[in-house]
Each structure stands twice: as C-alpha cells, then as structure tokens.
Amino acid sequence: MSTPSPHSDPLRLDTLLSRLPDVGSIRPVLDHLIATSQPDPARRWSGSGELGTAAGRLVDPASLREALTELAAAEARKVARRFEAVAALTDALARGDSGEAVGLLLEESAALEVEGDSAEAGAWAGVATQVATEAGDRRSAEAARRAARCARSVGALGEAAEGYERAFEYARGAEEIRDAVIAATGRGNVAVDRGRWMVAEQWYRRGLALLDSTESGFIRGDDLRALRWRIFQNLGITSRERGALEEATAWYARAEDESAGLDDSAVDIEVQNGRGQLDLARGDPRRAELRFRKALEVLDSVRPGADEVRVAVRTNLGEALLRQSRALEAGEVAREAEAEALRGRFFGRLPETYRLLAHVLHAQGESEAFVFLDQALAFVRTHGLPAFEEARTLEVYAELRAASGEEEIARDARTRAGDILRALEGDGAEESKIQDTTERDGDAR
C-alpha cells in the first residue's frame, strides 16, 4: 500500500468529483462538497491573477468525514419519513379516501422540494395531480402547479409548460382565479427560461386579465395588489429584454404604484433591482449601481442569511461596476456572489456570475478568462439548468473569442448557441395551447 507524501498537494474539488460516480444516491454528498469547499488561499483575487473557479476550490477530508455522519443520519430520516408516507397513503387508498391521499402526496412532495430533491418532489406531485383529477378534488390545480414548478427546477421545460397549462385549465374550471393567475405566471416564467419574451408576456397578460375580470371579485385590497404588482414587474422585465425600454419604464412605474404601502420586503428589493437593470439597459451604470446597493441594504436587513436573490443582485451590481471600468471592484463583488451561491447551493445562479467574471478578467487583459465560461457550462450540464443559460454562455464565449481575434472559434460558439436557441424555438412552437377566453410562481427572473 502506498504512503501519501507529507508534501502532497491539497485535494481540489475537481479532482475528487472526477473520481466519484455522479449518481443520485450520493448527490447530497456531492452538493455538500461543492457548498463547503474553500478557495485556495494561494490564489486569492488580486488584479488579473485570479483564475480559480469552483472546480479548483479545496476540500477538507477531515471536515467531510465529520459531516458525512450527519448527512447519513439526515438521509435515514428522509427515507423513514418517505416510507411512513407510503404506509399512510396505502391506508388512505384502502379506505377509499382520495382526499387524504392527495394531501399525503402533496405533503411529501412539499417536503422533498424543500430538501432540494425537485425531481422526486415532482414525481409525488404528478401522482397527486392524477388522483385529484380522477376524484374531482379542487387541489388538482395546486398539484399540477407544484409538479410544473419541480419540472422547471430540473430544466424539463416542456414538461413544466404542459404542467402549468394543465394547472391553468383546472383552476379556471374550478373558478379558482388566484390559482389560475399563479399558473399563468408560472407558465410565463417557463417562456422566459426559453428566451420567449413575447410568449411570456402573453401569459402574464392572461393572468392580469383574470385579475381585472369580474370573476376575481373576491380578490380585493392588498391581496389583489400583491398579485398585480408582481405581474407588472414581470412585464417590465420582458419589455426590457426585448428592448422596449419606454414600455418597461411604464410597467415598473405601475409595479411601484401598485406595491406602495404593502407589508412585503420583496417590494423594495425587487423594484430596486428591476429598476437597476433598466438603468443598465439605458446606459446609466452609476444610477444602476445605487439601486443595486439599495436592494442589497434591504436584503441584509430582512434576510441576513444566504439568499438566492442576493446572489442575483450582487451579480447585477458587478455588471454595473464593470461598465464603469471598475473591474477590480466588479471582480470582488462577483466573487462574493459566487461564494454565496456555493454556500447556499444556488447553483442555477452560477452561470451568470461566471459570465460576469469572464468579462472582468477579459477587461483586465487575462487571456485565460474563458475558464469561467467552461465552469458555467459545466454547471448548466451537471445541474440540469435551462438550455437558454448554455446558449447565453456560448454567446459570451463567442464575443470574447472574437474580441481576441479568434474568429473561427467564435464562429463555432455562435453556431452552437444558435442551434440551442433554434431548438428552444422548436420546443416552444406550441407555446400557447389554450385559447385566450379572457382576452408567478414568483418573478420572471
């Protein structure tokens, strides 16, 4: 048996991951490794010298061994709970109690989703949808919406689109207007994932039309305003993405007016962030910077722990700083966003952060800035992120290669990005299967 050298190099994350099977049974361990890895102190950010990505972070074997005991115990508790759910479900079905069966299925789905197992959570929600639909249970819309949200989380956008459309149909049939509005918003979000801005707007407007109809008469006051301002915010995002900046300004203004006075910390965070992105689109990075910093102040006061929204806002702040030629500051902010995304396991946010870091390093004349784009692509592929993220990353890759005079490589990347976008167009060719008779799960971004 060989004896390890006392002077052996530290164990890097990419080395360990390359020697572990990427199988579902050890996914909690793999995610834990990514989340708890540490930057190499020998390669700390300083000017253009930092090229370290998540793959090059360091793993502490002793800490991992300690953590594995709790990870194993947590997995055992989850298995025990799941088996108990099966037993309770069996009893309910034996009694012919479909209502209890739907409740048990949705409860387990919710627990799995909180634990980050969206794929299995979606499977439980899918069965809940079937049972509820067959029994005429009003929760069929809720179940279909949960299944769709889980599908979207794992990048199964076609399945997510169909699920949200089913949820919309079920909710309209049951005259559950709130559920229908949420399903329409979720369906719009799937279109955003595909880069289909006009289709997203169609669904957001469909939800808005329901809120404005006489059918929504029981939704009043702050409840109505809470639903409306988020749709306005989403319409501002889609307008901005397709370059209709004046239209986006009007939607953001309506979102601010509608949300004024609501007891919801998300208002100040999301409105400031949305306005900041609009300022960037208008070419005013200084004003955008101030808005992003304001959003972060609110976040720090109301949600001090690791937060996915903070990752997004920090990345936006980094973009605003870079556009002011403050590359070093932009890199530091992007590294903070990366660290929080890893710590909180918000892996879906990392491609955007790594695209920013590639731009930062390129601006500083670093020829190997493309390593960040390689890491972004790795996260897209290993964590089932939307293909639109891969296309955007390839577009940045092409942009930076072309700027370096490597036109052939840039052309290949542009071709690959175009192929993905065309495939998404084809996948969404039947985007709107429901006839609009009236004319979110959260935000579009």
Image (tube, rainbow, N blue to C red):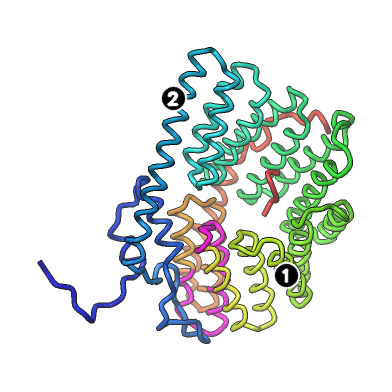
Give, as a three-letter code, the residue at label 2.
Ala
> Where 254 sits versus 397, above or below?
above
Q: Is residue 394 visible?
A: no
In the displayed structure, 378 sits above or below 86; it is: below
Q: List x then y, in percent, for residue 217.
A: 88, 31
Q: Nearer the viewer, residue 92 or 414?
A: 92
Residue 281 point in image, percent of width and height: 74, 67
User: In the visual, does 77 lie left or right of 385?
Assistant: left
Residue named by callout 2: 87
Q: Is residue 74 visible in the rendered structure shown here?
A: yes
**Pointer 1 residue:** 297
Residue 407, relative to residue 165: is it above or below? below
Number of marks in the image?
2
Amino acid at the residue labelled 1: Glu
* Residue span colored magenta: 343-372
Q: Nearer the viewer, mark 1 or mark 2?
A: 2
